[in-house]
Amino acid sequence: MLRTSERFGALPAYPLAGMKEIRRRIEAEGVDVIDLGTGDAQLDPPPAVVERLRSVAGELAYSRYGFQAGLPEFREAVAAWMQRRFGVRVDPLTEVLPLIGSKEGLAHLPFAYVGPGDAAVIPDPGYQAYFGGVTFAGGEPHLVRLAPEHDFLIPLEDLPSGVARRARILYLNYPNNPTTAVAPDDYYVGAIRFCAERGAILANDHAYSELAFDGYRPRSVLELEGAREVAVEFHSFSKTYNMTGWRLGWAVGSAEIVAALAKVKTFVDTGQYLGIQAAGVAALGSWETWVPGNVATFQRRRDAAVAAFRRAGFAVTCPKATMYLWIPVPRGEPSETFARRALEQEGVIVLPGASLGRGGEGYFRVALTVPEGRLEEAARRLARLP
Ligand SMILES: Cc1ncc(COP(=O)(O)O)c(C=O)c1O
């Protein structure tokens, strides 16, 4: 067997590996599996996006390397949207960077700022890219459990002083995957101060900024005083526009951080296909007209799923945002055992909280990726689990 690197060895085993085989087996036996595992909705992207990609697909100008500069119209459309949506003015050339999905940006950021001896503060449970990036950069991922008693926020004042001193990046993600928690402004104000005092970066993962309900409108960290010096925010087309597979996002914020991330990427990738960036311009152009309908779809699913899971006996908090429910596993059963039984015995795929980090133990996540009727059917089936 070939020897792998120490950093590679620090990665946890791939979660849910055995689940695929169980799914294959029971589907072959004729079970109608309901998949609420991955946050990948079975919904179409905006028609204007598909149309735009079609219209440029044959054009040579879009076929060539995008490099980190990418499509100038994309940067401009992002800057214009940041202004429309958040009232934040950014320079498209120096404060915006196209990404091949926000995940790669989140994972590549530590390569510029974190090395051996440095720490990064990471929510647990949390999106894998934070842990992966920090680990590959040779830094110390300091995982902090997102606990209900802290409203699923990272209590910055409780960080060990040795970690706080060495922290180079603080990853935050609100609205949060998987807990669905949102953060008040004063929490972000404290986080900006925390970073400013230590020369750390606030990496704000805003993948769910637009999937918010009941009139709630998450703000950009860049709206807050002092953020321009310390923060970089990551945005994604994946959830807002049902474009998960298109791999498009952007980083926005401090010109210094954006330039450093662009330099890292220069040594790793050559930019997203310009045709997809052109499609991204169309997506941002359809934000006012198309996104509200998409959000309404998720809100209907949320309402149906919350009611159905409550009827089924689960203690569900109604989320203000994201496309998930974060539900305590009944009777203290380990989340992986529960998820395995849910699939084997009832043909329902849910994500065990522990697969997103030890801090997620005790919960399972339901993704609102299927229509109301299927969500209700899934809740009914899970109620039958002994
Ligand atoms: C918290 C969080 N951040 C980032 C992403 C990644 O989005 P993208 O598809 O833009 O890489 C996701 C996707 O599931 C997510 O849940």
Image (cartoon, rainbow, N blue to C red):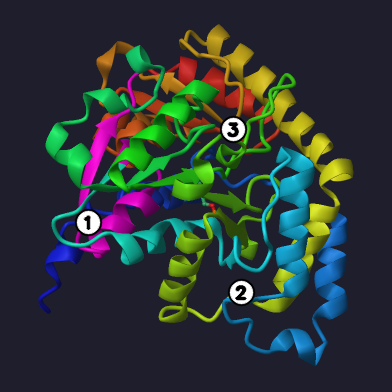
Crowding at mark 1 (Cα within 10 Å: few <14, some 14-19, many 20+): few
Residue 266 disc label: none
- Is residue 29 visible in this depiction of the protein? no
Q: Position of residue 43 (x, y in %)?
A: 73, 47
- Secondary structure of the residue carrying tag 1 is loop
Kindly identify the residue that appears in the image at 64 percent across and 64 percent down. 246
Residue 89 left/right relative to 356 = right
Q: Is residue 264 above or below residue 364?
A: below
Residue identified by numbered label 2: 272
Q: CA distance from mark 3 to mark 2?
A: 26 Å
Question: As shown in the figure, which amino acid type bears the numbered disc 1?
Answer: Leu
Residue identified by numbered label 3: 322
Is 142 magenta? The answer is yes
- The tag earlier along the polypeptide, 2 or 1, is 1
Q: Position of residue 352 (x, y in %)?
A: 36, 34
Residue identified by numbered label 1: 11
Q: CA distance from mark 1 to mark 3?
A: 27 Å
